[in-house]
Amino acid sequence: PIIVAINKMDLPTANPQDIKQRLANIGLNPEDWGGSTVMVEISAKKRTNLDKLLELVSIQAEMMELKANPDKMGSGIVIESRLDSQKGIVATVITESGTIKVGDPFVVGTSHGKVRALVNDRGARLERIGPSEPAELLGIGGQLPHAGDIFKIYATEKEARHVAEKRKLHKREESLIHQKHVSLLSLKSQVDQKLLKNLNVVLKTDVFGSLQAIKDSLEKLSNQEVAIRILHSGVGNITESDVLLAKASDAVIFGFHVDADSKVKEEAKASGVEIRTYKIIYDLIEDIKAAMSGLLEPEVVETVTGRAEIQQIFDLSSGKVAGSLVKEGKVVRGQPVRLLRGKDTVYTGKISGLKRFKEDVKEVEKGLECGILLEGYRNFQTGDILEAVTREERVRRIRPA
């Protein structure tokens, strides 16, 4: 069962009906629409309807007869993770079963460690947490865990280390297989898409959840002409190694809720590396879309400004001349043109010469006859239609694939 909390109802732009419609479109029909999905309109900021939400959660848990054994070795799930300059890796976990205690050996993802501290939402240190209790956990060594990773307590540090090493080995083997597969596909892709342009990006955020959300959004922006290459992504402030990577690969560094110290900023400035930091994900995505749009070839829009029908062919010392009648608009010397024979375009180029009664002229208006010479083309036929065009380049905007 799913309980949906529709937040930010204190805002004037709140539109719960729109949210409900979107959820209904993916199969989550609200109870008040005759469906089975419970939805509560809340405001976490104003604490509106939080009591109602908690009551519904309690009722649902009671109906499902949810139970957990607090005497087992604890296991849970990572809700969020971040890199703290003072504390190191900090993971917000919620216990699903058993009890997690300070000093317990554990494995999360491919990392292992010993629970160094447990901190609740008020900043108080705890000795243990039981089923359904959340806390910030310190003591993780190795890599930053991902949201959704399983956290599990083991009897000994030796056992935890062994499990973590096996996971690392398995992940490394999978990575090697994936790299070989990707390299072959990449080779074919480069042959098939020689014109593909890349926007190289180094991405740093404050927490893993934000990192994943931004990466997911960026992946949707790539299309057949421009692709985003995230060369490196991670949690924590922007470092000198990020700048070195960006310099070597002509990348832009994007940061969300992170910063760079003065030394790193000086290095970036000296290296010509741009660092852009944001507080709002929407602004970051829009700036990247604008940068990608700059890599797109402009759209060339053609407008027909004149049409002439070829009525006779003349032989001059300079070559064949198309005796024509301008039927629409005007034709201008040097203007881009295309020559139509029935439905086929037999020539594209430009007017190299334009004559009226053997005199060279610059342009000829509708209703007048003239002689037309085309650059590099002499195979005219009576009845051919000459279209004079103007070409305008327009900036294109990135659209997700």
Image (spheres, grey):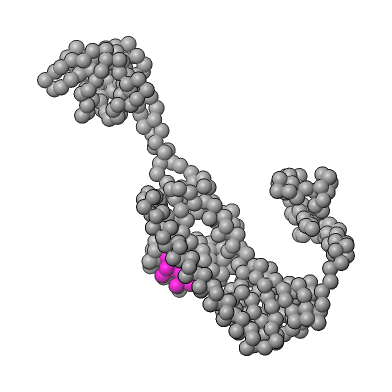
Q: Is residue 144 left or right of residue 292?
A: right
| Quadrant showing the N terminus | bottom right
Q: Position of residue 2 (x, y in %)?
A: 78, 57
Q: Which residues are magenta?
A: 237-246
Q: Position of residue 363 (x, y in %)?
A: 27, 20
Total labels: the figure holds 0
Q: Quadrant of residue 371?
A: top left
Q: Position of residue 116 (x, y in %)?
A: 67, 84
User: Compared with residue 292, is residue 390 higher up or lower down, i.e. above or below?
Assistant: above
Image point 75% across, 50% down: which residue?
28
Q: Nearer the viewer, residue 277 or 375?
A: 375
Q: Main secondary structure of the magenta part?
A: helix
Image point 67% across, 88% down: which residue?
156
User: Does residue 393 appear in the picture of this structure?
Assistant: yes
Q: Is residue 157 left or right of residue 228?
A: right
Q: Does residue 127 show up magenta in the picture?
A: no
Q: Position of residue 266 (x, y in %)?
A: 43, 70
Q: Nearer the viewer, residue 51 or 77?
A: 77
User: Compared with residue 76, is residue 272 higher up or lower down, i.e. above or below?
Assistant: above
Q: Quadrant of residue 151?
A: bottom right
Image point 45% across, 61% down: which residue?
182
Q: Nearer the viewer, residue 116 or 67?
A: 67
